[in-house]
Amino acid sequence: MSRSKDQAERGRRWYVGDRLHLDVRGLPCPEPLVAVLRLIDGGDAGDGLTALVSREPLLLYPELDARGWSHRLVTPAGDTLLRDGEVVLEIQRGSA
């Protein structure tokens, strides 16, 4: 069963406290990048978000830098929800 276009553009979103989390794993390129940038550009990301992605999003980094956002990879210890190659990316407004 395929996801609708709306679901694919947004990914799965939830909050932990005030922090937005976005799961774009499994979306075809360039949808993960587009989903993150839409949240940032639309103001929905607040001051930061955490993104779960299928692989390190190298093409996203220059886009974040151009918008004045910083990023860092997080390696959760013992996280069994991540498969090989999947990463957690913390994205913050402003430079690090």
Image: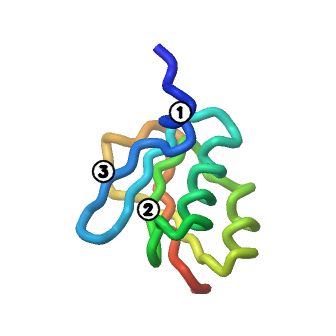
Residue at the disc numbered 1: 26
Q: How is the image coloured?
A: rainbow
Q: Earlier in the sequence, mark 1 or mark 3?
A: 1
**Identity, as a three-letter code, of the amino acid under mark 1:** Gly
SS of the residue under disc 3: loop
Check disc 1: other Cα within 10 Å, few if <14, some if 14-19, many if 20+: some
CA distance separating discs 1 and 3: 21 Å
Q: Are the two marked residues, 1 and 2, in contact with CB atoms closer than 8 angstroms?
A: no
**Identity, as a three-letter code, of the amino acid under mark 3:** Gly
> In which quarter of the view is residue 8 placed?
top right
CA distance separating discs 2 and 3: 18 Å
The circle on residue 4 is none
Count of numbered circles on the image: 3
Question: Which residue of the protein is positioned furthest toward the top in this rendering?
Answer: 1
Query: Which residue corresponds to the image point at 47% horizontal and 67% vertical from the top-left?
Result: 45
Question: Foreground: 13 or 89?
Answer: 13
Decide: is 63 above or below 1: below
Residue at the disc numbered 3: 78
Question: Which residue of the protein is positioned furthest toward the left in this rendering?
Answer: 17
> Residue 33, image x and y in percent?
65, 51
> In which quarter of the view is residue 61 placed?
bottom right
CA distance separating discs 1 and 2: 16 Å
Residue at the disc numbered 2: 50
Decide: is 17 above or below 78: below
